Amino acid sequence: MSHELNMALLIGAAVLLVCVGAVRLSVRLGLPSLLVYLLLGVVIGEAGFGIDFENAELTRTLGICALVVIIAEGGLTARWSTLRPVLGPAVVLSTAGVAVSVAVVGVITHYALGVGWQQALLYGAVLSSTDAAAVFSTLRRMPVRPRLAAILEAESGINDAPVVILVVLLSLPEGVTGPWWLQLALVVYELLAGAVIGLVVGLGGAWALRRAALPSAGLYPLAAVGLTVLAYAVGSVAHASGFLAVYVTGVVLGNAHLPHRRAMLGFADGLAWLAQIGLFVLLGLLASPSQLGKAVVPALVVGLVLILLARPLSVLVSVTPFRFGWRDQAFLSWAGLRGAVPVVLATIPLSAGLAGAQTLFNVVFVLVVVYTAVQGVTLPPVAKRLGVTAPGETTDLEVESAPLEKMGADLLQLEVPAGSKLNGVHVDELRLPVGAVVTLVLRDGGAFVPAPETRLKTRDSLLIVATEQVRDAAERRLRAVSRRGRLARWFAEHGEDRRQ
């Protein structure tokens, strides 16, 4: 027993360290690191090192646990000021958009692949959910307009809830589910109840943490993550959507100005990376490479239907009423990244022993690998081609800094891109609000503390400290100057994200 434990620890530590190193390699190659984890799981599986793993039920259970952590991190790091304006289209895209995607994929799969209606709709349901881990890890490294990034992140955090409900219902034997109107009422109840539970747990947890005066700073991150898990458990016991409860709780806690917030976000980020690594390696381990060859053609067919027809139609139906232009819609369609979530969802009918479930799992696995690679690599040039990039936007810099924590401040980074009106502007002409200041300028491989008369140049990198109260105002001012220069206010430019 001791020898087996030591070997398990040895293999686990080696896999973890290889995956951590793979993040750096994947960034250099421009590939999503999540694919590397999947392939590593395949390598150490039955076709590689010979580890035979076929427990779909255990994979589903551990996969749900990992998704809880990943969704919680997405909620904790979401800024309400950015999320609030896109909440309407994000909710519609996560509900009505999901219904459109399921219907389109289901109908075409039924006729193109000759499978029954239940299995065809399962294809649509499993593949209709965008993956939070893939979306977060990809978009947060790209200078995409805040409105588009926010709606994609919100969608990936919300749409897991209705999709899980649909997959569970479609995995039940025929005749067990009851009339359609009863199932629709059940879906509505689970979503509404999940949102309410998440709100109550988040508000109650924030109130308690602000008054708890815990003896160690390290206890606050543990408590925050524990509250998100509590929200999932309460939601599940109440037969509500646990995933939606997790996301709502995370958003409330992440925007509640809690003590040691920076430490909390750093802990959640590390835990989410661990969950992603473990989840993707486990899914790769469950796959049987000898069976994947037959799934290539069906995966390509379903993938083309999903990307070229189902996703664009769901976006068109969902966001057109909110006045999104065709360029924005095209980007939202192409950026609907799939990842671990569809593969995890495919284990639900597999563990239930549903006919054709193994084929479904193999097709979804191949589709995720192929199309994640294609979309992940092409997303930056597609965004640039569509004109939805925003190189003048500030980004968060995650640093461990006690003074910033005490000040309740964030450290931002701003690049001065070619063509920006920031070029030639003096630092004092930025007119940042009180509480925001440019602390350092990186230029030509060197760094210096700027004076008020320092003139900014193209390709400068600015480090800006801004308190939480003025962060949004500082970002709007920097955006305004980037567009119209030092006289932005004279041109009635206030830095709002008005581009549709």
Image (cartoon, rainbow, N blue to C red):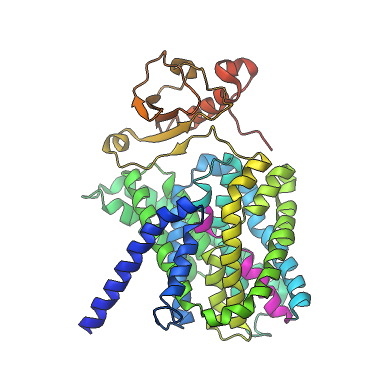
From the viewer's perspective, tell me whether residue 92 is left or right of residue 36. Answer: right
Q: Which x, y percent locates residue 108?
A: 76, 71
Question: Which of these two is toward me, 34 or 468?
Answer: 34
From the viewer's perspective, tell me whether residue 449 is left or right of residue 340. Answer: left
**Residue 28 position (above or below residue 257):** below
Taking the spot 51% from the left edge, 17% from the top edge, the residue there is 424
**Residue 425 position (above or below residue 110):** above
Question: Which of these two is toward me, 173 or 449?
Answer: 449
Residue 230, magenta (yes or no)? no
Q: Which x, y percent locates residue 122?
A: 65, 74
From the viewer's perspective, tell me whether residue 476 is left or right of residue 296. Answer: left
Magenta span main SS = helix
Residue 118, magenta (yes or no)? yes
Taking the spot 60% from the left edge, 78% from the top edge, the residue there is 293
In the picture, the quarter occupied by the C terminus is top right
**Residue 23 position (above or below residue 324):** below
Which segment is the magenta one? 115-135
**Residue 422 position (above or below residue 108):** above
Question: Which of these two is toward me, 347 or 379?
Answer: 379
Taking the spot 54% from the left edge, 29% from the top edge, the residue there is 476
Taking the spot 37% from the left edge, 57% from the top edge, the residue there is 21
Q: Which x, y percent locates residue 188?
A: 63, 64
